Image (cartoon, helix red, strand yellow):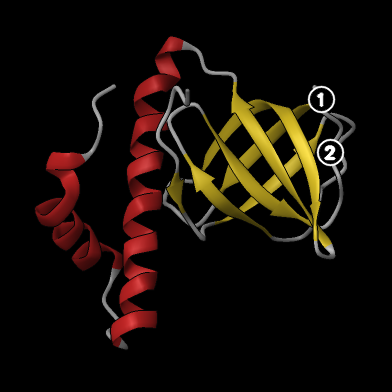
Amino acid sequence: MREFIRHPSSIPVQLTKQDGDVTSEINTLSNVSFGGVSCLCEKPVDKGSSVKMKVECIDPGFEINGRAVWCKPSNDIYEVAIEFIVSKNKMFLLRMVEQICHIEHYRNELIHNEGREITSEEAAIEWIEKHAGNFPEM
């Protein structure tokens, strides 16, 4: 049974392996949960290795350490699952980043599905009205 609910995303991130190697210029989150993420990368990441994930599309940017849980090929790229290594003082920030990812995903869906472009702030207001009540508690 899954401990955390996974949510689709399309947020760009930078994933750096423990040796300092960046997995690709732009990685895309494919699923987000409170426990971790999976993302699409150009280079494989060894299971168990330490990684650092940066989300720079939010202001201020967010950085978190994690561990690669698995890595599998997906066409000509790799899907990598990252388990967050979170201290208690980062729990709140992590939760905020998860919500921001949901809001940006919502904004991108509006553009794709309805052809409606709105700002991140407008998307946040709409998303909160529609979905905040269903967002799982910590």
Instruction: Compute the Cα span from label 1 to label 2.
Output: 7 Å
In this picture, residue 65 sits left or right of residue 74:
left
Residue 83's place in the image compared with 59, above or below, is above
Residue 137, x across and y down, in percent: 23, 25
Q: Which residue is pictured at 40% across the width and 40% down the height?
A: 97
Outermost residue toward the top in this view: 88
The residue at which mark 2 appears reads as: 45
In this picture, residue 90 sits left or right of residue 102:
right
Amino acid marked by disc 2? Val
Mark 2 is surrounded, within 10 Å at the Cα level, by few (under 14), some (14 to 19) or many (20 or more) other residues, namely many
- The reply to whether callout 1 and callout 2 are in contact (CB within 8 Å) is yes
The residue at which mark 1 appears reads as: 49
Mark 1 is surrounded, within 10 Å at the Cα level, by few (under 14), some (14 to 19) or many (20 or more) other residues, namely some
Residue 115's place in the image compared with 130, above or below, is below
Give the total of numbered labels: 2
User: The residue tagged with tag 1: helix, strand or loop?
Assistant: loop
Residue 43, x across and y down, in percent: 86, 51
Q: Which residue is pictured at 34% across the width and 37% down the height?
A: 96
In this picture, residue 29 sits left or right of residue 74:
left
Outermost residue toward the bottom in this view: 115
